[in-house]
Amino acid sequence: MRPDDKLIDYLIGFEALLLPNDKLELSFKLALRTAVLIGKNIKQKKEIFLIMKKAYGVRSSIVHGEEIKVPIVINGKNFGLNDLVNSTESYLRLGIIHIIKIL
């Protein structure tokens, strides 16, 4: 399983979880909803928002055949593709757990 494939799969999961009927401003809505759902404080919500917005942008680059520029810079910090994938996976797991608890 390649990191780029994982990132696409995880973001498809997020789209199904948080964007079932949305068609516009997907990266913003996905990042915002993820941050609100799993962030515990303002600082954490901001970090989650920025990472998820960047993850969606990288996903778009992948599916449109563009080259991914590494390191991926988010809020002045350097991320490798694997770092971004791992963060996205963790956020998806937490999001699913939160949704299950709500139900």
Image (cartoon, rainbow, N blue to C red):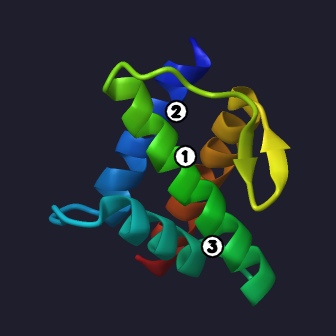
The answer to the question of whether label 1 and label 2 lie on touching residues, with beta carbons closer than 8 A, is yes
Q: In the image, what residue type sits under mark 1?
A: Ala
> In the image, what residue occupies the spot 44% across and 36% down?
59
Label 3: how many Cα within 10 Å (few below 14, some 14–19, many 20+): many
Q: Gap in Å between the C-alphas at discs 1 and 2? A: 8 Å
Q: Gap in Å between the C-alphas at discs 2 and 3? A: 19 Å
Task: Read off the residue under disc 3.
Answer: 38
Q: Which mark is residue 85?
A: none
- Lateral position of residue 86 relative to residue 92, left or right: right
Task: Read off the residue under disc 2.
Answer: 7
Quarter of the picture containing the N terminus is top right
Residue 80: x and y in percent read 76, 31
Q: In the image, what residue type sits under mark 3?
A: Ile
> In the image, what residue occupies the spot 41% across and 68% down?
28
Label 1: how many Cα within 10 Å (few below 14, some 14–19, many 20+): many
**Comes first in the chain, label 3 or label 1:** 3
Q: Nearer the viewer, residue 70 or 23?
A: 70
Q: Nearer the viewer, residue 96 or 40?
A: 40
The answer to the question of whether label 2 and label 3 lie on touching residues, with beta carbons closer than 8 A, is no
Residue that extends furthest to the right in the rendered view of this protein: 77
Q: In the image, what residue type sits under mark 2?
A: Leu
Q: Which mark is residue 55?
A: 1
